[in-house]
């Protein structure tokens, strides 16, 4: 029943957000066509009960315009809005897939490292301001690092993987860890405080992904053909992206730090883009491409097929 109620809350929020504003009559027509109505209208008392629950659970206010008697969702700050949109999208997709079990053999999902088993504990750590202790097995090492104690500052999802950033107590430095590489995490009994001058929003502001760098922000320029440019317009590489259109190509500009994950992302587009500057990034790209080519130019040591 609780799961069904949650799905109804998600439906109500998602419907009002998609339409912008709706009267009770319009909302009722949509509700009757939904899988939750059994063909019956949404009672006024139930609607107000859902409104109150949504405000309490999601901190989302469904307001009524007194001149038009239409309901709309009150705007919130940009960061909170992005978090809520992600949560709503995830929940909405989950509901949709749950209703599509009969065509499950026609839906294929990407296999990604799972962080579900640790995510709940990490969220509790953030809410209760309690350090978390764990061992960590990065891909780059054979043996795990044991007994890390971290004071979590914030969570970030990047390329469908969850990362936790906070202060490593032993090293007294801010570090980032992938949740799916944590081993046997546990909450500690002590509490901590996040420094007042720490700005989670600004920490990765000038980075591409989850690698923090103390270096300077650089003005990066890349050239793409018109087809690749369409993709970058739809899915920007970075929030600082600016485009200058030309007849047969586009040049994209970014104010960004040059980190390994950013370089790797640029390399992944192969010949579809060319880095124009700064010179140091051009050098990194050329060196990486040369070393890649060398791997194919060396005599093969494997047996012939």
Image: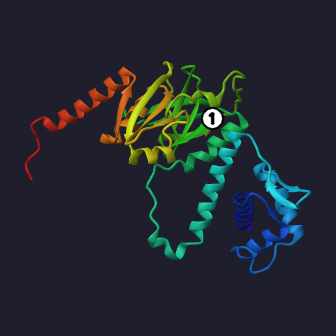
Above/below status of 302 relative to 217: below
Whole-percent x, y for residue 127 in the image? 71, 39
Q: Is residue 196 left or right of residue 116?
A: right
Above/below status of 248 relative to 22: above
* Residue furthest out toward the front: 247
Q: Nearer the viewer, residue 5 or 137?
A: 5
Quadrant (top left, top right, bottom left, bottom right) of the N terminus = bottom right
The secondary structure type at the circle numbered 1 is strand
Q: Nearer the viewer, residue 253 or 264?
A: 253
Q: Nearer the viewer, residue 142 or 84?
A: 84
Coloring scheme used: rainbow
The image quadrant of residue 190 is top right
* Residue furthest out toward the bottom: 39
Residue sitting at 78 percent across and 50 percent down?
A: 60
Q: Name the residue tied to disc 1.
A: 154
Whole-percent x, y for residue 271 in the image? 30, 40
Whole-percent x, y for residue 285 in the image? 32, 29
Residue sitting at 60 percent across and 67 percent down?
A: 96
């Amino acid at each position: 029943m609780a799961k069904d109620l949650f799905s109804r809350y998600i439906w109500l929020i998602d419907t009002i957000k998609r339409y912008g504003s709706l009267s009770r009559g319009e909302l009722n027509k949509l509700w009757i066509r939904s899988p939750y109505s059994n063909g019956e209208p949404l009672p006024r008392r139930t609607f107000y009960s859902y409104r109150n629950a949504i405000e309490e659970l999601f901190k989302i206010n469904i307001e009524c315009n007194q001149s038009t008697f239409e309901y709309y969702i009150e705007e919130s700050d940009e960061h909170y809005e992005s978090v809520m949109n992600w949560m709503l999208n995830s929940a909405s997709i989950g509901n949709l897939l749950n209703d599509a079990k009969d065509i499950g053999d026609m839906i294929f999902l990407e296999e990604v490292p799972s962080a579900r088993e640790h995510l709940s504990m990490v969220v509790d750590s953030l809410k209760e301001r309690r350090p978390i202790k764990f061992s960590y097995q990065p891909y780059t090492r054979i043996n795990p690092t044991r007994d890390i104690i971290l004071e979590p500052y914030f969570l970030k999802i990047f390329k469908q993987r969850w990362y936790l950033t906070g202060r490593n107590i032993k090293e007294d430095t801010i570090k980032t860890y992938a949740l799916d590489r944590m081993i046997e995490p546990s909450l500690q009994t002590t509490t901590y405080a996040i420094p007042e001058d720490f700005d989670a929003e600004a920490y990765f502001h000038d980075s591409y992904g989850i690698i923090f760098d103390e270096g300077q922000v650089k003005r990066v320029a890349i050239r793409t053909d018109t087809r690749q440019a369409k993709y970058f317009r739809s899915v920007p590489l970075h929030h600082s992206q600016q485009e200058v259109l030309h007849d047969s190509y586009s040049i994209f500009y970014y104010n960004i730090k040059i980190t390994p994950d950013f370089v790797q992302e640029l390399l992944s587009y192969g010949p579809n883009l060319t880095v124009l500057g700064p010179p140091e990034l051009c050098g990194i790209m050329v060196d990486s491409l040369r070393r890649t080519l060398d791997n194919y130019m060396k005599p093969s040591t494997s047996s012939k097929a």
